[in-house]
Amino acid sequence: MDARLQQYEDKMKKAYDYLEADLATIRAGRANPHVLDKIRVDYYGTPTPIQQVGNVSVPEPRMIQIAPWDKSLIKAIEKAIMASDVGITPSDDGSVIRLVFPEVTEERRKELVKDVKKKGEEGKVAVRNIRRDGNDAFKKLAKEDVSEDEIKQLEENLQKMTDKYVKEIDVLVEAKSKEIMTV
């Protein structure tokens, strides 16, 4: 691939990966350990991801269980979860913390699907902005003795790349929407 196109490919891939990670944190009735990805626990003065201070498991479809390696962290983990936007009150029995996900209502599912579609649109806008930046950069190449045909070819390849990522985002959004609407 042309080095001039590679930087735009990398940026589009990053935009897609960001969206994918963001959608993974949306809970859809099923317990998904990724909802804890953004939560940090104060571990001896250092904000640390929950996955690094204990074992995170899903023993049942609607429950996440966190078994901290250091039992003195239980209150700190609960506090971090309460302060986050997960929206679930943790319960503990002295050795493990449980997060029980309530059944999601039909109305809430529809709201979540709207959120997913909105995030998908934002992802597509990001990809299109990268395309615009690329096209602007390619137009400036005309001043550097690059042929019109070569510039046209770069723009066409950038458009194909944009179409590919927009299509992938659509597939991702569709899959997440389907997952949310599945009871």
Image: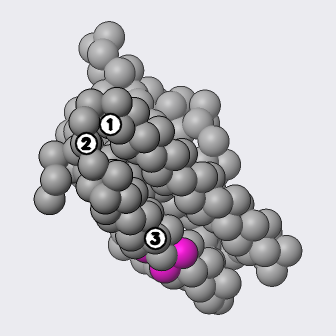
Whether residue 80 sits left or right of residue 94 in the image: it is right
Whether residue 162 sits left or right of residue 153 in the image: it is right
Give the residue type at disc 2. Answer: Val
Front residue of 51 and 163? 163
Residue under the image location 69 percent in, 59 percent down: 118
Instruction: State yes or no: residue 151 in magenta.
Output: no
Considering only order in the chain, which callout, 1 or 2, is on the residue closer to the N terminus? 1
Contact check, label 1 and label 3, Cβ < 8 Å: no
Give the residue type at disc 3. Answer: Asp
Calculate the distance from the C-alpha at mark 3 to the C-alpha at mark 2.
Answer: 25 Å
Q: Which element carries disc 2, helix, strand or loop?
A: loop
Calculate the distance from the C-alpha at mark 1 to the C-alpha at mark 3.
Answer: 23 Å
Q: Quadrant of the C terminus?
A: bottom right
Return the mark for residue 75. none
Task: Give the magenta part as a residue range.
Answer: 168-172
Q: Report the magenta stretch's main SS.
A: helix
Q: Residues within 10 Å of mark 1 (few under 14, many from 20)?
A: some
Q: Nearer the viewer, mark 3 or mark 2?
A: 2
Q: Which residue is mark 2?
A: 146
Which image quadrant is residue 170 in? bottom right
Considering only order in the chain, which callout, 2 or 3, is on the residue closer to the N terminus? 2
Q: Residues within 10 Å of mark 2 (few under 14, many from 20)?
A: few
Give percent across and percent down for residue 13.
33, 55
**Furthest residue in direction bottom, as rendered:** 183
Q: Quadrant of the N terminus?
A: bottom left
